[in-house]
Structure formats: structure tokens, C-alpha cells
Amino acid sequence: MFGPKFVFALPLALGLTVQATQLFGNHGTLSGWDSINHEHQGTVQEVTNVYYEPSTALKMTQIYDSSYSGRYHSEVVKNNVYKRGDTGFYGFAFRLQQDWQTSPAQSYNLAQFIADFTDTGCDDYAPSSMVWILGDQLYSRVKFGDICDHVAPATFKELATITPGVWYKVEIQASWKSDGTGYYKIWLNGTSVLARYNIATTFKDDREFQFRVGLYANGWHDEGALKGSQGTRQVWFDEIAAGSTFADADPDQW
């Protein structure tokens, strides 16, 4: 379930106690989301047999259909998680199915920050940041500029090797700036795998962005075909959160 959570952090430089706020936290349940998106034959299920922390997790499934030309989202959605100028931490735990086929490599998205730009006439829903699996590697990206300019994103490749059937926890810290003064960091199981400073991390726009977590089989849509022979893909997610400190979003600390 969701709800604001207040914790206290001790800044080392000042020695002062300040209040930090968890924007939201979900322990792998279907309740509390602003929406749940499962397209075509995809499903989003709350399960009790596989989880990161007892006793629930979200199982996301997508099934390839060669006669279908749409997208393949199975995601949970939290609205209004950031806007330009904000800074925050965002975390989740995930596990690929035990027999996940890593070769030939194809993209499967795990999380994204996204907003509706339909009113611009230049795009519909467009993500600023994405985290995905390609083969057995973890990738991420940030996109920026004017939405109508379709600027190529900055892609961060081969951040870590992911083993199917194993739980991982991901934490992102972002300073959402469009002027080249932002930063973007990722930790995997508490170890830093990415830190980029003095970069643009979001679009030149002040609208609110959603945080979506789940399986989006974007490679099937973008490439127009399934690579390999595994047309049913499943990913489990748990301990999804956002807040103003690392502990707010770390699956092991709340």
C-alpha cells in the first residue's frame, strides 16, 4: 500500500537532524497505484509464492503475438513523481524468470519516467528516463531537449550483468534538469554502477512525470518481431518506492 513516510537523516557536514519524506512505497501489491497498465495479452498479478520481502510481489507477464502491432506494457503507474527542478531517489527490486532467454539479445524495459505530450502535437507519451535489460546487461538512458526536436537520448550501456532467477535491487538518484546542470546515478544491490554529473536529464518542460515499473517488451514493438524462441516473458517486482533520501527508496531500508 501507499502513504507518506517520514524518516530522519543526519547530514554529516552540519550535524543537524532534518526531516526526509518517502513520497510513496509499495510492498508488491496491486493496491494504491494510480493506474495499472496491461496491454494485449499481458497481465499484472499480485503473488505470494515469489517475493523479495515477505509476503507479496507483483508478477508481470507479456506474450508475443505476431499478428499484433501494438505495444506490450505490463506496468504499475504512480503519477506526479517528479517535475523539472526536482531531485529524488527511486527504487525497486526485480527478478527475471529462471529460464529467461538472454540470447539473441532484445530489449525489455523494467522502469521508466514518462509524461503525456499529446498536447504538443509532436509526441504522445514520451519517457525521459528508462531502465532496461538487453541480453544479460542492464542499460539506462536520459532524454532531454525540446520534445518537438526529438533529440537523441544519452544511453548508458552494459552497467551490470543480470542473472535470471536472482533478485536485484535498483536505486536511481536524479537531479531533473534540462540545462546541463543535472545528475543521474544508479546503484545495483547497493553498488554504484553509474554516476553522471553536469548533464541534462529531462525535457525542457514543467509537466509532471509518472514513475512506471513493470515489464515493457519494447523490443517486440520497436523491432517488429520476437528475437529468439521465448515468446512469454515474466518479471517479478517488489518494494517499489520514491523519496528524498537513499533510505526512502532502498528496498532493504523501509
Image (spheres, rainbow, N blue to C red):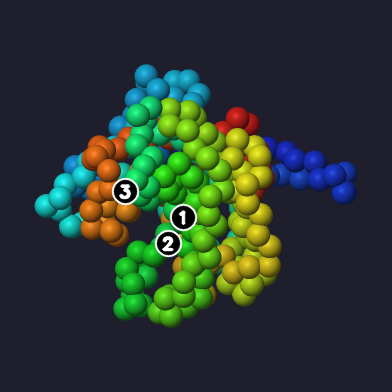
Q: Quadrant of residue 119?
A: bottom left
How far separated are the C-alphas under marks 1 and 2?
7 Å
Which element type, helix, strand or loop, lies under badge 3? loop
Label number found at residue 217: 3
Between discs 2 and 3, the one toward the N terminus: 2
Location of the C terminus by quadrant is top right
Image coordinates of residue 151 in percent, x first then y, are: 46, 75
The residue tagged 2 is 127
> Residue 187 vs residue 157: left or right?
right
Q: Amino acid at mark 1?
A: Met
Q: Amino acid at mark 3?
A: Ala
The residue tagged 1 is 130
How far separated are the C-alphas under marks 2 and 3?
15 Å
- At x 32%, y 68%, the residue is 124
Location of the N terminus by quadrant is top left
The residue at the far front in this view is: 104
- At x 59%, y 40%, the residue is 188
How far separated are the C-alphas under marks 3 and 1?
13 Å
